[in-house]
Image (spheres, rainbow, N blue to C red):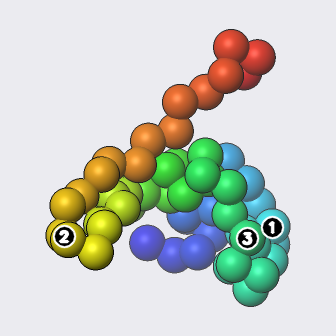
Amino acid sequence: MTQTELAEAVGTTRQNFANKMTRDNFSSKELCAIGEALGVKLVYKDSKGKEYPIEYIPDNEE
């Protein structure tokens, strides 16, 4: 998948996506959308190896 295709899949422009990649500045919503577009699930793994899924739950405002 190209950067342009991934940007489109998460609902942004290639330029905006590239800027966020450079700054390493993604929201949890964006990271979850990227994971979904790539077909992967995000998890937090603690020091003991226990995994916790990371999901974006939208507010009622969205």
Residue 58 lies in what quarter of the image?
top right
Q: Residues within 10 Å of mark 2 (few under 14, many from 20)?
A: few
Query: What residue would you read off at disc 3?
Result: 25
Given the image, on which type of amino acid does mark 2 rest?
A: Gly
Q: Is residue 44 left or right of residue 61?
A: left
Q: Residue at x 67, y 22 (%)?
A: 59
User: Depth check: 25 or 10 in front?
Assistant: 25
Query: What residue would you read off at disc 1?
Result: 16
For the view shown, which residue lies furthest in the left direction?
49
Q: Residue at x 43, y 72 (%)?
A: 1
Q: Residue at x 18, y 70 (%)?
A: 49
| Residue 36 visible at all | no
Q: Mark 3 and mark 2: span between their CA atoms? A: 26 Å
User: Depth check: 57 or 30 in front?
Assistant: 57
Query: What residue would you read off at disc 2?
Result: 49
Q: Is residue 5 above or below residue 9?
A: below
Chain-order first, disc 2 or disc 1: 1
